[in-house]
Amino acid sequence: MPDAIDLNTAASKDVTNQAPVVGVIMGSSSDWDVMQHATAVLDAFDIAYEARVVSAHRMPHDMVEYGATAAARGLRAIIAGAGGAAHLPGMMAALTEVPVFGVPVPSKYLRGEDSLLSIVQMPKGVPVATFAIGEAGAANAALHLIANLATTNPVLREKLIQYRTKQTEAARSMKVPQ
Amino acid sequence: MPDAIDLNTAASKDVTNQAPVVGVIMGSSSDWDVMQHATAVLDAFDIAYEARVVSAHRMPHDMVEYGATAAARGLRAIIAGAGGAAHLPGMMAALTEVPVFGVPVPSKYLRGEDSLLSIVQMPKGVPVATFAIGEAGAANAALHLIANLATTNPVLREKLIQYRTKQTEAARSMKVPQ
Amino acid sequence: MPDAIDLNTAASKDVTNQAPVVGVIMGSSSDWDVMQHATAVLDAFDIAYEARVVSAHRMPHDMVEYGATAAARGLRAIIAGAGGAAHLPGMMAALTEVPVFGVPVPSKYLRGEDSLLSIVQMPKGVPVATFAIGEAGAANAALHLIANLATTNPVLREKLIQYRTKQTEAARSMKVPQ
Amino acid sequence: MPDAIDLNTAASKDVTNQAPVVGVIMGSSSDWDVMQHATAVLDAFDIAYEARVVSAHRMPHDMVEYGATAAARGLRAIIAGAGGAAHLPGMMAALTEVPVFGVPVPSKYLRGEDSLLSIVQMPKGVPVATFAIGEAGAANAALHLIANLATTNPVLREKLIQYRTKQTEAARSMKVPQ
Amino acid sequence: MPDAIDLNTAASKDVTNQAPVVGVIMGSSSDWDVMQHATAVLDAFDIAYEARVVSAHRMPHDMVEYGATAAARGLRAIIAGAGGAAHLPGMMAALTEVPVFGVPVPSKYLRGEDSLLSIVQMPKGVPVATFAIGEAGAANAALHLIANLATTNPVLREKLIQYRTKQTEAARSMKVPQ
Amino acid sequence: MPDAIDLNTAASKDVTNQAPVVGVIMGSSSDWDVMQHATAVLDAFDIAYEARVVSAHRMPHDMVEYGATAAARGLRAIIAGAGGAAHLPGMMAALTEVPVFGVPVPSKYLRGEDSLLSIVQMPKGVPVATFAIGEAGAANAALHLIANLATTNPVLREKLIQYRTKQTEAARSMKVPQ
Amino acid sequence: MPDAIDLNTAASKDVTNQAPVVGVIMGSSSDWDVMQHATAVLDAFDIAYEARVVSAHRMPHDMVEYGATAAARGLRAIIAGAGGAAHLPGMMAALTEVPVFGVPVPSKYLRGEDSLLSIVQMPKGVPVATFAIGEAGAANAALHLIANLATTNPVLREKLIQYRTKQTEAARSMKVPQ
Amino acid sequence: MPDAIDLNTAASKDVTNQAPVVGVIMGSSSDWDVMQHATAVLDAFDIAYEARVVSAHRMPHDMVEYGATAAARGLRAIIAGAGGAAHLPGMMAALTEVPVFGVPVPSKYLRGEDSLLSIVQMPKGVPVATFAIGEAGAANAALHLIANLATTNPVLREKLIQYRTKQTEAARSMKVPQ
């Protein structure tokens, strides 16, 4: 089961020469401000990933190719972010059995309400796991796929538990001015 | 200019053996209740069309193929209807330079608000002409493409003007109970 | 068929002395910030157009006149932008058989949600092809009408395909910081 | 001041031969279910009115004519109801200085949210007095214009005060099961 | 009919010593930024008015008193502006037969959507004429009541027609950069 | 502290001759379908209450009187339900220092979204405790005021704890078909 | 009845050594900007309170503990503020019979619409008294619980009446520029 | 790696005596109509699951216990459905590192808009993978977790690919009446 081995390795510190196990794709380079919150989490967990622009609307054939080769290239999860009429996550879910995690990028006038509905309201049979609009959603897409990977990877699971513990401690140490 | 000739012919009464100049596609056969309002208009104008299910999410490769061959097959317009996270119109617009006319099909819980935003909020560069949610939108998608075709087809333009005149007369003859 | 000839000419470089084939109208000069994204596209395609303020609410008779003469003056498409209770696109569609392409201009408090619904929710029989709120919508209205004109104009079609190819290449060359 | 005299007469019981002082117009005969709540109030106050279909989108020239002659024909108020992309009230306000009272008729999928925004969000300079979506709004449009007429018509003012008193008494007599 | 006389006088240039015919009230002094667009219109038409804060929630008894004396004090219209859970216009409509013109003041987080619904969705029997959110709505409330007053005041009517003509000319003179 | 004694008595079985400690008011008898879910809870806790129609818009002076006498009559809480432009809860909160618990009654076309915003978005200084749209909100308004009363009434607190325990047990016994 | 005594004391000037009767909790220290409007009101009324971060999502066990001990520690009310998917108020209401007053904190992209719905739409049986989005809601949550406490505390009731009187006077003294 | 073995077994036909690998929980038995679309998918894939009511609001301690023991009991995914102020999915995500898949159950008046926002808008650090409102979302939650499990389970992956292929074929065979 090479996937599991890759991933164990992925969970080690040095990920520079590894094949990515997660694809982080977005509709435009302008989405990076939001989507870097996903890769920051992946970095924190030493998950090997690739990040690139794959525009559903301006590069549809690249998108199809990306979906067609995702599983064979060893991707075990795809994080897809897009804004407005956000089709990239749903189309990627149509193109590969690799699970897709969608991030609604805020749009200029409707603040991501359009992005959210375009991503989450998928028809029966073709799921996109959808997260909050913007930065929180990008980070959480990464955390959720890590939680999935962690169910068969004890090292990663340990790291996730530590991450959550640290997060609890950070919240506990928050003070309000008195 | 064979297109114009085809279309003139299309505008004649007998369209049974003609190559379609309009593709009417929808995400599911359940969209037919709405989308038949588009084909009814095309029928009324003797425009040769084809109508079929092309699901963006369940048949993405067929969708790509449909887009790739649309122009070569002589289509001069595509009417695409879909509901919820409605990606078919926008993806078709990404896949072909043939103009796409999108119809937001009402969704079960959000009554088409999701469909509308998923279709109309396309990014710069890949337009979908969007119409009202539901039956009115389906009919109007057909009427709008006919108006476009009519700009170079005097026969069709005459029919359109007659259609509009008849419509005005029908409205004028409406009475309210007194 | 002088229209087709005009348009071929329109697709040539020098458009200064040509009769416009597209009317770009808007409810107020304050809409220009958005609507210039439509004329920029028309410029890029060497389509002869005219751009002017035609307020549905403050100049209703000019609007009626504009609609009444549109076809005779050789217009083959009208791009109409308006915000708030945006009636210009729909009224123009009522006044002429020339196809109307509507652009919802963002409004001060509701960010264009009112503009969008006022434009897109037209009743059966009087279609307005509607595009995204704001700049993207303005550009796309122009691109869509070009796609319609291109179905009978090989020169224009070639330009459109080149435009789309360049757009794909621009998206492909987008990098995210790594 | 013949207007005031007309209206006093209008406020008398026999209105059959009177020139209407109120125009009740609507976009389609299907709006009647809602709009009859306006005429019922006018009937109750013996205000002479006319009720007819004037479709902004299917009869734009009739609409222009209606607006152009409204003042000269003695109309002192226009109640205009429409649904969806509801342009009739706003266009009528553009076409005449006679005050316009707008009624958002519920739409099939968006329940009148589109109608409301299309009517109420008028730009500075061209007001439409807007009322609630549906039956309540239709009745209130009539009541509001009566309140305006009543400011210069003591008979009508007395009737309005009686109407309100009766209404208060009806509310006071409402019982909840105990 | 002293009202008509008052108003004719009101329409003269010198209004300083006149009894107000319009009450402009608002829920807080912070609403003034918006509501001054109503008084600016009244100033332009030389309509005598009073402007003051009458908070429905913090001064309910003053509000009741204001409503109870409005007609007797000679008010022929009340413009009421409020934001959020905006109850002032509707309560004023409950308290006096003088017609009420409501202005939805933009709220901090919901941009006036709450204000609009709180004002426009009045139950049958107690109408508030509602206008657009914010500045445009404030100006239009004033213009609409002037249109009502003008139906029995030829001087005012003449001014209103001039105002509209000037407005049309201003729109006609708008240029877009070419 | 007679209040506490009253309330202890209120919490006994026989409440028929007691002065009410809770006023349940609503804008119309048509609100009873929803509001009876509040009185059913009060019945279950043997809280003496009165239930009546007090329309803010059709009976504003009765409403003022109700507010003015609420405290003196021994009311310790007021549950106010209304729909649409729902002003009753907020106005009652303006009229008395007795705490007001607001219930958004579903409206015909906007399903209570207008009611909710009209009730909850009160300005600083005049609070209305707001609950869910419809039946759940009515019941919860009663439960919340009981929780407040229970903080100084051990008998009532014991009943509330039992009510919650029973509710937990009922949920625990829910089965899904397997 | 030590609670009542505590509260009387709480209503005295010196609250520094008192056990808190109100818990003010929030999901993050970033909510403090809004929530301090609640504690400012409590300060103004000399109500002893505690203010701390209790994150439902990052400190769920602390939250459970907080709820489990709230009544025993003498809390008579809990003000809970949270934004986005705001679960803290509703979960606290599930965990203790002490009444919970919820404050929707504005969220980054949806401006608190998500916060509001997540807090107010509680199911039957587990009420959260909900107030306006943001600062006004925070202040009003405190004022409402004070109104509840005041029903059995004459000193507090007197203070509340004075607070409201002062507020009325402040509103009365508001002037608009003339 | 016992998890993988369990799951392989889970993927076999006979699941009756197996420990569940998926927990399907919902806030009320009334959610079953929707949530059975999740278990139907799990049945189709022979995934061992348990389905039960765990109300966040009425059984908070059971919910905590459920979360605390989920990982140890071998659950590798939790599907949580709830409506209105839907806190179950988010709280479960706070209570366990096992990944949570949230299903917005349609609510009575807001049709699931409240449910959706309450589930999807989770803060950074505590993700809930969210799916469409209603039946489609329930089925897709199950399909998405299967896609995750399939990344390390070749048998399951094969079934998933077959499921998708069959789905594509079903869509391809859809006909529209001609």
Image: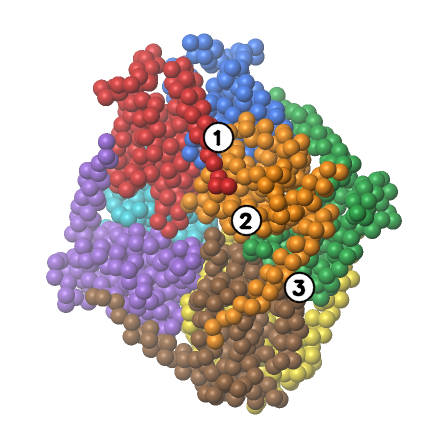
Chain colours: A orange, B blue, C red, D cyan, E purple, F yellow, G brown, H green
> Which chain hosts label 2?
A
**Residue E175 placement (x, y as % from top left):** 22, 36
Q: Which mark is residue G140?
A: none
Q: Which mark is residue A40?
A: 2
Q: Is residue E140 left or right of residue G102?
A: left
Q: CA distance from mark 2 to mark 3?
A: 35 Å
Residue D68 vertical placement versus G137 (above, below) = above
For label 2, the SS is helix
Q: Is residue H31 visible?
A: no
Q: Which mark is residue H57?
A: 3
Which residue position is annotated with label 1?
A: C172
The residue mark sitting in front, 2 or 3, is 2
Q: Is residue B25 left or right of residue B6?
A: right
Residue B32 vertical placement versus G64 (above, below) = above
User: Quick one: G7 or F70, which is closer to the camera?
Assistant: G7
> Which chain hosts label 1?
C
Amino acid type of disc 1?
Arg
Amino acid type of disc 2?
Ala
Q: Are marks 2 and 1 on the same chain?
A: no
State the residue at coordinates (18%, 52%): E156
Quadrant in which residue D80 is drawn:
top left
Q: Is residue H135 left or right of residue E171?
A: right
> Which chain hosts label 3?
H
State the residue at coordinates (37%, 57%): E106
Q: Are marks 1 and 3 on the same chain?
A: no
Q: Residues within 10 Å of mark 3 (few under 14, many from 20)?
A: many
Amino acid type of disc 3?
His
State the residue at coordinates (33%, 67%): E28
Count of all numbered marks drawn on residues in the image: 3
For label 1, the SS is helix
User: Quick one: E39 or D162, which is closer to the camera?
Assistant: E39
